[in-house]
Image: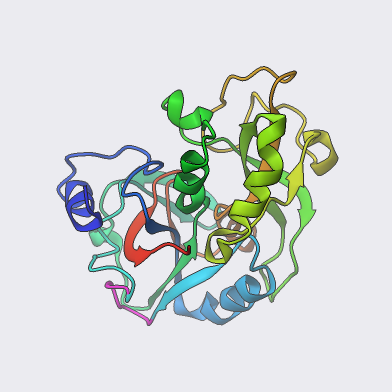
Amino acid sequence: MNPLEQRRKFRFQEESSTTSGMCDNYLQANMIILPQEYAFDFLLFCMRNSKSCPVVDVLEPGVTRPQIADADIRTDLPKYRIFRNGKFTEEVKDIRSVWQEDFVTFLIGCSFTFEKALLEDGMSLLHQEQKKVVPMYNTNIPCKEAGQFKGSMVVSMRALKPEEVEQAVQITEKFQTSHGGPVHIGNPKEIGIEDLSAPDYGEPVEFNEESRIPVFWGCGVTPQNVCLQAKPEIMIAHSPGHMLITDQLEEK
């Protein structure tokens, strides 16, 4: 299915599943929507932390159609999360009822984009095979501060066979708008993750730790985590694992 057809399924709420594995070859994007008063500091935060927050588009206040997709960002993602004063309040499939004309939308690259390249190289992605949302974890890796935005990086994890790891690094380093290469390989406790079976976002995947190595990439949930600490009166984001599928082809 092409991106436009898939987005229409989300728009008319015919489907709301994770976008991992959907629309091969097209860039997927995380989304953060904030009132305009927070926009400059947040953009500065993204520029200082491009590994976890690679910006691919920024919409002007009140604009609902990005340049990288023939889409309405209020309806064309499978699920959204609404946060008020730093607290999660609800998950919805349409945000038109809460839209404000001072909203600034940030679209940030997503690691789902490079998954097809890993699959084409013969690697198996367990979250896809097990039909789960990729596991994501809070870490102790600090982000560079910008104004009121500060915090630690969130990472996504894919468990790979030892012989696949080096090639996975080489492949993903080419995808600079989708987090690039891994930020950590191996022992999760070194980056503050105590239990891989209890992700902070997404769902746990089952794997044999003797035959597979956990590999961690920067994750676009990082800005959600950071924004919650800034406690804006309202923030809207994609639900983890439920991205905007754009019309922009991925890097090669």
Residue 38 seen in the figure: yes
> Residue 242: x, y in percent?
39, 46
The vertical placement of 183 against 136, above or below, is below
Please name whichever residue, 74 or 137, is drawn nearer the observer in this view of the structure.
137
Q: Is residue 76 left or right of residue 124?
A: left
- Write the residue at 53% across / 59% down: 178
Please name whichever residue, 240 or 183, is drawn nearer the observer in this view of the structure.
183
> Residue 157: x, y in percent?
62, 38
Q: Is residue 63 magenta?
A: yes
> Residue 224: x, y in percent?
55, 56
Examine the image and state in which quarter residue 65 appears.
bottom left
- Write the residue at 46% across / 79% down: 36
Q: Is residue 33 magenta?
A: no
Examine the image and state in which quarter residue 101 appears.
bottom left
Q: Is residue 209 left or right of residue 159?
A: right
**Prevailing secondary structure class for the magenta stretch in the rendered image:** loop
> Residue 124: x, y in percent?
52, 31
Give the tally of numbered discs.
0
Residue 240 seen in the figure: no
Please name whichever residue, 21 or 135, is drawn nearer the observer in this view of the structure.
21
Please provide the residue range marked out in magenta. Answer: 60-66
